[in-house]
Amino acid sequence: MYGEIQKKLGIYIHIPFCRTKCAYCDFYSFIPKSENIFERYTDTLIAHMEAYREAAGDRVPDSVYIGGGTPTAMPTDQLIRIIKAVKRNFKLSKNTEFTVEVNPKTADIKTFRRLRRAGVNRISIGLQSANPTELKSLTRTHSRADFEECFRDARAAKIQNISADLMFGIPGQTIESLLSSIDYLTRLHPDHISLYDLKLEEGTPLARIADKLTFPDEDTEFEMYRKAVEMLEKRGYMQYEISNFARPGKQSRHNLKYWNCEEYLGFGPGAYSYFNTNRFSFVRSIEAYIKGVTEPSSKVNLTVGLEQISGRAQLGEYIMLGLRLNEGISMSEIARRYGVDFAALYGKKCEKYIKYGYMVLRGDRLRLTLSGMFISNYILSDILSFEDLGALSPAGKF
Ligand code: SF4
């Protein structure tokens, strides 16, 4: 209605299938044993979205993100059914950013054409490294030529917005090899680049053999990060978040929602939501998820960790997520939103980080410097005394 502010929403859909399992990965995903799981899972997702249609009410989703796992590890027909169900059940904004995550060798030009026709306008492709030895140590099963073919297919199918993922801190990686991966990738001109620090997640095959591998030491990792940011900026990719870089106007609208504490609904096993001031996730098991959605009277606890985020917790999240952004947080915005004086509450703790160059206070805004971003988890948990920083992402990512 004219003059009325529309309430925006992000939608995340988790596809927990992969063709192979990477040694470092602890996302909820697995290699399906039988083909019929795809249809069962699609039917379940569609039923679940229908169940939420009313709750979403007049909210207007302007970002949809189908991630995983590997969404394109499932048949395109099923993926298209999911996309159509999103459009049918929610009143998407006309210029919705609609992303699908892809891995090389799981999608070709035909797949991309079908996705684009169905409404997808952004593709995120996992490269991780352009160096064959590093790809092998990550147990990625594609080459850089496979990535390039996938990238060119997406462009040929007229996907205008392409993001690619890279990693640093890989066993055997050097500053030179990281910069050479960035050089290679930027020559293809993606619109957006995510650069993640490889984390050793407990229980993963990589963590089990970590003591037999040589990882870059902490000083080298910081140099990698610093030089990577410098090179990306020289090539036109401005850092807007700790791990994210974009050409002008190509920042990920969906991910910005997480960092700006805006509402999003996540569907699928292990997917997180922040909706109506509640944070919750769905059970991290596909069979339990299917049962929980399709047999509501079963004993399955479909919703996990439901928590009303109010008052101090909301403020903590706003600070924690806002400090991930280059622009940082605004003191006056904190006063306006939460009615508190940031300096009185956290000023003392921030002083030492400002003094040693990890934070900068300019006028109304406080932000992390590059060195601060590198140790952001440490700084944030010190300031806010939060223990579980990982709980604030859909499907536990980033
Ligand atoms: S990193 Fe991605 S492709 Fe590899 S196993 Fe995890 S979800 Fe699958």
Image (cartoon, grey):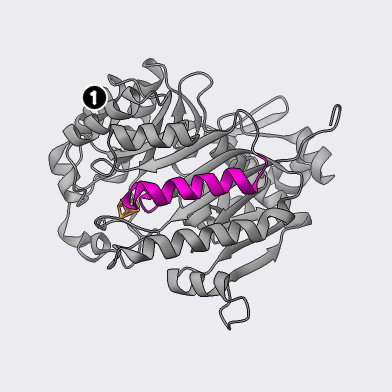
Type of residue at label 1?
Tyr
Which segment did they paint magenta?
A: 68-91
Residue 70: x and y, percent? 35, 50
Mark 1 falls on what kind of element?
Answer: helix
83 drawn magenta: yes
Residue 284: x and y, percent? 47, 68
Residue 106 versus residue 27: which sits nearer the camera?
A: 106
Can residue 271 be seen at all in this image of the molecule? no
391 drawn magenta: no
**In the image, what residue occupies the spot 29% across and 21% down?**
188
> From the Cβ of disc 1, is ligand 1 less than 8 Å away?
no
Residue 4 versus residue 91: which sits nearer the camera?
A: 91
The relative height of residue 204 versus residue 246 in the rendered view (above or below) is below
Q: Main secondary structure of the magenta part?
A: helix
Residue 225: x and y, percent? 36, 34
The relative height of residue 254 versus residue 276 in the rendered view (above or below) is above
**In the image, what residue occupies the spot 47% across and 54% down?**
14
What quarter of the picture does the N terminus occupy?
Answer: top right
Can residue 39 be seen at all in this image of the molecule? yes
